[in-house]
Amino acid sequence: MKALIVLPLAWLLTFGVANAQSADPASLLLPGYTLDASATGDIFGDGSEAFAVLSHDANSGSPATYGRADLFSCDAAGENCAPALTISLSPFDGGGLFVAQLTGDGRQQLVIYTVSGSGGFLSYQVFGIQDGQMQQLLERDGVFEGSVEPRANGLLERSSDRAWLYSWNGSEFVGTPANVSPPVPIGTVKLHYNVTATSVTGPAQVSVRVGQRLELVRDDARTDNTRILYGSDLLTVDKWPVLIATSPGNTSIDIIPRGYDWDNELKVTVHVEP
C-alpha cells in the first residue's frame, strides 16, 4: 500500500530545489498538491532542522485522495531545504504527522499517519535514524477506529476501546496491550462491560446528570475490537472514553463487538437527568 520513492533528478531540478529554499510548508509542495499537515524537528540527529509535510493531490477525487509525505533536510536556521525522503500513500480521508522522541535515547522520530474508510482505519509509519541512516522503524496498517499518539515511554496506539503501547527495546519496537485510564472527577459514573466470543455483557441502563461524566470501562483482556455509538444529541466526548452529559433526556450507547457484529451488541439506555 505504501512505497518508498527514490527522488528522480528531474523532480529535484524542477521542484525540489526551486520550492525547497524556505521553511514555509506550502513552498515545499508539488504543484497541484494541498497541504494537510507539517512538522519540524531534529530528525536527522545532526542539529539541522528537518521539515516534514503531508499533502494530497487536489485533483485526485473525493473523499479519498492520493497523498504523499515528504521530508526535507534544512540548515540550522530552517532554510536551504533539500528533499531527503518521500513516502507514497494510499488514498486517505484524513491524516497528519508529528515529531517526537520515541526511542528513549534523545533522538527524534517522524510519525506519518492516515485514516480512511467508514471504519476509521488507521495506518501509520515511524521513521528515524538508526546505524547512521534513515530507516522505517515501525509500520501498522488497517487499525479499526484507530488513533496514535506519543507517550513518554513510546507510542500509544488505540483501536476503539483497546490500546497497545509500542516501546523501543534498543533495536526494535515491541507492542504490548495497555490499559489506559484517564483521570476523571470524583463522581464520574462508570459503565463497565465485557466482550466475549459471542456477546457483550454489561448493564442495560445507567443514569447521569447534566454536566456529569460517564466513563466507558472495558474489563476483559480479549483483543476483539468494538464499534461504540452514542447519542451525540445528549452526550459529547470529554476525552475518550469519557463522555459528558449535555442535555436532559434519554439516549443510548451501542457497543458492537468486532465492529460489525450487530446481532450480539450491548445496547445501554442512558437516562440524563437535569
Image (tube, rainbow, N blue to C red):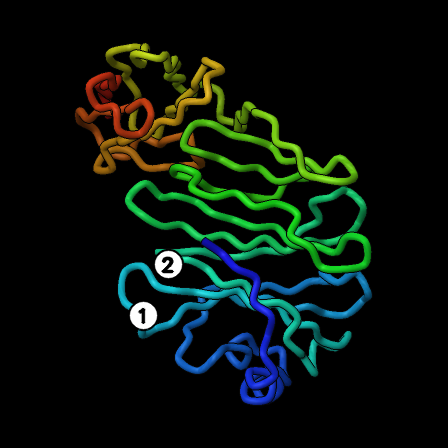
Q: Is residue 193 left or right of residue 153?
A: left
The residue at the point 66 percent across, 48 percent down is 137
Label of residue 60 in the image: 1
Residue 207 % position (x, y):
28, 17
Q: Nearer the viewer, residue 136 or 35?
A: 136
Query: In the picture, residue 108 is in which quadrant?
Result: bottom right
Considering the numbered disc 1 on the image, is that residue within a helix, a strand or a loop? loop
Q: Disc 2 marks which amino acid?
A: Pro
The residue at the point 44 percent across, 34 percent down is 159
- The image quadrant where one finds the C terminus is top left
- Number of other residues with Cα within 10 Å of mark 1, as a class: few under 14, some 14 to 19, many 20 or more: some
Name the residue carrying label 2: 91
Looking at the picture, does residue 21 appear above or below residue 64? below
Label of residue 246 in the image: none
Residue 57 % position (x, y):
38, 71
Q: Which of 56 and 151 is in front in this view?
A: 56
Looking at the picture, does residue 190 appear above or below residue 129? above
